[in-house]
Image (spheres, rainbow, N blue to C red):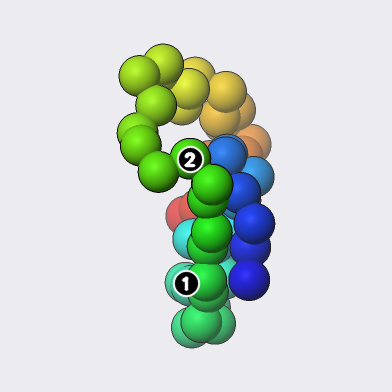
Amino acid sequence: MIVGGGIAGLTLAVKLASCRIRVLLVEKDGKSGLIFKSGLLQPKSLKILD
């Protein structure tokens, strides 16, 4: 279980799922954010998702 759908939580969830590990991601905020946040991902961070 991963608590929090922020950048760290989502990145971890994607990485674990790509390794065929079942993931449960929980987020207390039930609506989408209106603020663009993907600018926080640095090139080194994006390499992890490849």
Mark positioned earlier in the residue sequence (1 or 2): 1
Q: Which mark is residue 18?
A: 1
Horizontal side, residue 29 vs residue 12: left or right = left
**Image quarter (top left, top right, bottom left or bottom right) of the N terminus:** bottom right
Look at 57% across and 40% down and name the residue there. 6
- Residue at coordinates 61% horizontally, 49% vertically from top-left? 4
Residue 14 x/y as whole percent: 49, 61
Question: Residue at horizontal 48%, vertical 40%?
Answer: 29
Q: Amino acid at mark 2?
A: Asp
Q: Nearer the viewer, residue 31 or 48?
A: 31
Identify the residue at horizontal 56%, vertical 29% (top origin).
41
Which SS class for mark 1? helix
Q: Which is in the foreground here, disc 1 or disc 2?
A: 2
The disc label shown at residue 2, or none: none
The kind of residue on which mark 1 rests is Ser
Q: Is residue 32 above or below residue 30?
A: above
Identify residue for label 2.
29
